[in-house]
Image (cartoon, grey):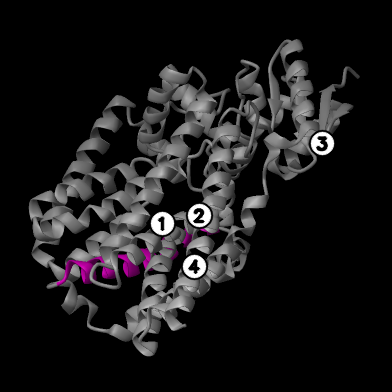
Amino acid sequence: MGQAWARRIDLLVLVLACAFAAAVAVDTLGRAVTAVAYPFELDYAEGAVWTQYQGFRGGTAYVPLSGLPYVVFNYGPVYYLLTWAVDLIVGDGLMAGRLVSVLSTLGAVCAIAVLVLQASAGQGGRGLRVLAAVLAALAFLSLYPVAHRFVHMRVDMTAVMFGSIGLALLRPAWGRPGLLVLPCLCFLAAAFTKQIAIAASLAGFTALLLVFPRRALVALALTVVAGLAVLGLLQVLTDGGFLVHGLGYNLNRMRPSQLGWLFMPPLVAPAFALLVALSLRDLLRAGGLVARARAEPAAFMRLVLALYFAAGLLCGLFVLKVGAEWNYFFDWLAAGAALVGLAIVGLAERRARVHGGRADAVAALGLAVVLLWQASIALRFHRPWADPAGTATDHALLALVQATPGPILSDDMVLLLRAGRTVPFEPAMIRELTHAGIVPAEDVLALPRRRAFSLVLVRSSSPDLFSPEFRAELAAHYRKAERIGTTQVWRPDPS
């Protein structure tokens, strides 16, 4: 009777795990296929990144801001280069950028699964560890910030991919120091994708310093030298513009109210947060992790994951920058997903030890799967490509832009680029640049005064992207014309 019930519980757990895996995998695939080909904006920042890519490909990257168009290149060249390579195949910059993000996400989730397998070596059976690794990777995909963002033309997922792969490559380097060059290259790639994508490198080098200090110092020195060499080359190729754009033009104001974003990811998926907490509790209770990491590669990888989680939270404080959102927590969530995998293994193993039966172990695993399912609630949201009314509005706006001669300003920059137009400036960025005095505010305010734009398109959902002074000048020298969907069309006032 006991064995019969154990088999039934086994079957139930398998069904639950397969249901969760299938739901997340199918939804993720559906999002990727449909969203990548969607011709319009999925996120405001897509227009900014596409504009930067166009300039990078056109040879105007990192040039001084001497006049229209005012284009700030926020990031290093890695994402632009990858997008260019894919663009040569698909022939559309926006689609190429989204494909890079989707493929980067795939690389990141594979790295998360590998990290779970590495850190759980010696615990439980192989089948349990593989299942926990798969569920951890899918849990990352099912989190609201990731499910919403991974299809966007943004650099974040590419940086997370390089960082997480770099951490996974620390395991083979544990016994073969010469292989440390591989994770170091990945950490550099992450930093030259996004300047503040340093959570993985912080975790990796800190773990090495704690466990193998001499080895760590050599690897760190080589990484710094290589990074400075690449930086010097970029400075030469851009006539000194690379650092000016990456640092001088990219210093948004800090706003304490932004700290509220810090508490959102755990609140979106409380089950995810619970499993992370259980994993961290197990790591702290075990104690002596640094000492064991010198003798056990699995313990070393558990130390790496704990430090990755801490570094991800620390780097997440950059969310204080104006305009920052959930994307600043992706490293934190990736580390958390790997810890979820460890929690599943630890929970199942602990229950098996206490109750001495396989049935109890798989029951505990089933509980973990059910908890993970709660995180998948996020999968139901954010499908603008499936909104016929929104798509019809975008087509109407596109037709208007294509039919109107002269420069056009819009807070939907994808719309302008889709119509083959030049983006004069990114509204949110020009607001920061004028506030900092990098671009003279008078030069920007003079544009609506002299009616420099044939049309100005402002969505009701984002009027604050433009500064109050600019909106005042717009109201004084332009008149409200037609309204298309949520977008207000402003035309020059001839009076």
Is residue 203 visible in the rendered image? The answer is yes
Task: Identify the residue at horizontal 48%, vertical 43% (top origin).
Answer: 250
Q: CA distance from mark 2 to mark 1?
A: 8 Å
Q: Quadrant of residue 159?
A: top left
Secondary structure category for the residue under label 2: helix
Measured as percent of width and height from the top left, residue 125 is found at 29, 69
Q: Which residues are magenta?
A: 296-321
Q: Which mark is residue 13?
A: 4
User: Circle 2 sits on which residue?
Assistant: 21
**The disc labelled 4 sits on which kind of residue?**
Val
Q: Which mark is residue 134?
A: 1
Q: Are marks 1 and 4 in contact (CB under 8 Å)?
A: no
Task: Give left or right: position of 69 versus 59.
Answer: right
**Majority SS type along the magenta span:** helix
Sequence-first tag of 4 and 2: 4
Q: Position of residue 244 (x, y in %)?
A: 40, 37
Is residue 341 toward the left or the right of residue 230 in the image?
right
As for residue 494 lying within the magenta part, the answer is no
Q: Earlier in the sequence, mark 2 or mark 3?
A: 2
Secondary structure of the residue carrying numbered label 1: helix
The disc label shown at residue 486, or none: 3
Nearer-the-camera pick, 391 or 397: 391
- Determine if residue 324 is in view: no
Query: Does the CB distance between marks 2 and 1 fall below 8 Å?
Result: yes
Q: Look at the image and say whether residue 318 sits in the magenta stretch.
A: yes
**Number of other residues with Cα within 10 Å of mark 1, as a class: few under 14, some 14 to 19, many 20 or more:** many
**Could you tell me which residue is drawn at 44 percent across and 21 percent down?**
87
